[in-house]
Amino acid sequence: MNEIDRLEHIIGQVAALKTFCVTVVATYPNPVELSKCLSTLAEVTMAKTLGGAASESVLADIESVLADLKDAASKRLADGA
């Protein structure tokens, strides 16, 4: 597998995992607890990543995905479900 194939493979995996995560957020029975836990774990993830050798691009991508998941959780809370 060449570098482009590997990159496309990873992009596909991330897209599928993000879809799964948004599905879980949308159907989770306790959206308040989910939102709190997501915020806490997002902070932990960023703290661990900042302590490593991650590039600015990797940090921005992590923040972007976490923001999308937090947005999904916020929409779930707004729906009152």
Image: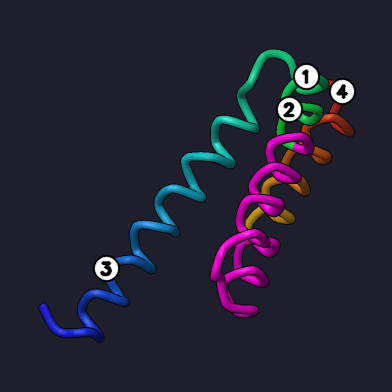
Q: Name the spot of residue 5 as percent of width and height, x first.
A: 20, 79
Mark 1 residue type: Glu
Label 3 or label 4, whichever lies nearer to me, is: 3
- Residues tagged 1 and 2 counted as in contact (Cβ below 8 A): yes
The label shown at residue 9 is 3
Question: Overall secondary structure of the magenta stretch?
Answer: helix
Mark 2 residue type: Cys
Residue in view at x 64 percent, y 47 percent? 45
* Image side of residue 61 versus residue 34, left or right: left
Describe the element under mark 4 as helix, strand or loop: loop
Residue range of the region highlighted in magenta in the rendering: 39-64
In this rendering, the answer to whether 60 lies above or below 41 is below
Could you tell me which quadrant the N terminus lies in?
bottom left
Q: Residues within 10 Å of mark 4 (few under 14, many from 20)?
A: few
Provide the residue designation for mark 4: 80
State the count of labels: 4
For marks 3 and 2 on the same chain, the one whose residue lies earlier in the sequence = 3
Label 1 or label 2, whichever lies nearer to me, is: 2
